[in-house]
Image (cartoon, rainbow, N blue to C red):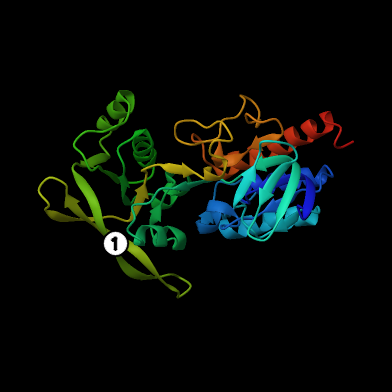
């Protein structure tokens, strides 16, 4: 028998998950949140966040997530550290499995987010977590590279959008692509080809990220990106590109493996929701944040959709006569 039953369960604890929990708790839905393998989501591997409203001096990503967590706890949210390993959405109540228990819920909010795809070098992911000059989000971190030279890896619309955005701050943007033609739309290509700040490293892949130690004003020593070692995909020749920052724009992967063959998804694996709501293809299941958003992918938009999901769930539960 399942160990426990909940009116509302939330899977994921990024801005969407925590905001859902705050709103649901204040509506007396007594939600349970499963934190998963990365409590706090992608912001826990982000250094300074300067574009979240209410923090004029900026706030560290992990600190912002801690504040959201404490706020959810304040209103009575039950947060469990386990990961959901399997779900059964074929009948209500929905069945959730962790390593140690089973539980049921009347309504479910999915806020499992999406993960940036990295180059598989190890150093790229490491430096993204320590503020060492590698990022998967130009909109989030471009401001830090005012007057500096940066590179963008990728050849699709996202890479070209990032490169164009970064020219607002950086003195030079080098777009690194493994082929001699871009995959992006013609309109995006025309835009970058007209931009004098954008240069191209055709037929190139990043072989190695070269770093150096830098001393911060606090006296702390940190590892920062210095240059890239590039390999020509045609000739095999190697070269070095000196930069201050690297933006990896080779795509995101939504964390939706749990819901394969159970919920409607688009061709990239993002959960599909009804326009103007967070309702998925199964009555009583809602999706919020980056798991259903492949366009904006910002903390503030994730939090907003988390609010929507909690309100949608509250209204649905009330319509079923499950809450007053």
The residue beneath circle 1 is 226
State the residue at coordinates (32%, 26%): 185
Q: Residue furthest bottom?
A: 219
**Of 232 and 283, which appears nearest the observer?**
283
Relative vertical location of residue 317 with respect to residue 171 in this rendering, above or below: above
- Crowding around mark 1 (Cα neighbors within 10 Å: few <14, some 14 to 19, many 20+) is some
Q: Is residue 26 left or right of residue 162?
A: right
Q: Is residue 108 left or right of residue 155?
A: right
Which sits in the foreground, 257 or 147? 257
Return the residue found at the far right: 324
Task: Using the rendered view, name the quadrant where residue 241 is placed.
Answer: bottom left
Residue at the spot 43% in from the left edge and 52% down from the top edge: 144
Q: Position of residue 191 (x, y in %)?
A: 31, 28
- Residue 280 screen position, x and y as percent: 63, 31
Q: What SS does tag 1 mark? A: strand
Rendering coords of residue 1 (x, y %): 77, 53
Question: At 30% from the left edge and 37% from the top edge, which residue is drawn?
Answer: 155
């Amino acid at each position: 028998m399942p160990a426990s039953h909940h009116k509302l369960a939330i899977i994921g604890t990024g801005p969407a998950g925590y905001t859902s929990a705050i709103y649901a708790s204040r509506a007396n839905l007594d939600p349970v949140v499963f934190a998963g393998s990365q409590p706090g989501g992608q912001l826990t591997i982000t250094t300074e966040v300067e574009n979240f409203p209410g923090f004029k001096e900026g706030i560290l990503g992990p600190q912002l997530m801690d504040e959201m967590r404490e706020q959810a706890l304040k209103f009575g949210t039950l947060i469990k550290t386990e990961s959901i390993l399997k779900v059964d959405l074929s009948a209500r109540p929905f069945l959730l499995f962790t390593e140690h228990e089973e539980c049921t819920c009347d309504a479910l909010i999915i806020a499992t987010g999406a993960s940036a795809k990295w180059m598989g070098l190890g150093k790229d992911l490491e430096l993204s977590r320590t503020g060492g000059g590698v990022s998967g989000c130009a909109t989030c971190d471009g401001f830090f590279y005012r007057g500096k030279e940066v590179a963008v890896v990728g050849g699709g619309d996202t890479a070209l959008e990032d490169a164009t955005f970064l020219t607002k701050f950086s003195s030079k943007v080098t777009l690194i692509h493994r082929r001699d033609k871009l995959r992006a739309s013609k309109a995006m290509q025309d835009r970058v080809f007209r931009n004098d700040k954008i240069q191209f490293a055709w037929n190139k892949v990043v072989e190695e990220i070269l770093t150096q130690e830098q001393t911060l004003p606090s006296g702390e020593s940190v590892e920062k990106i210095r240059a890239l070692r590039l390999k020509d995909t045609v000739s095999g020749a190697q070269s070095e590109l000196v930069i201050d920052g690297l933006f990896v724009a080779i795509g995101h992967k939504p964390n939706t493996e749990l819901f394969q063959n159970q919920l409607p998804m688009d061709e990239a694996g993002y959960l599909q929701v009804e326009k103007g709501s967070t309702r998925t293809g199964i009555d009583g299941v809602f999706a919020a944040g980056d798991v259903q958003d492949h366009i904006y992918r910002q903390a503030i938009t994730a939090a907003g959709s988390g609010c929507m999901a909690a309100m949608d769930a509250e209204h649905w539960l009330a319509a079923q006569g499950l809450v007053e």
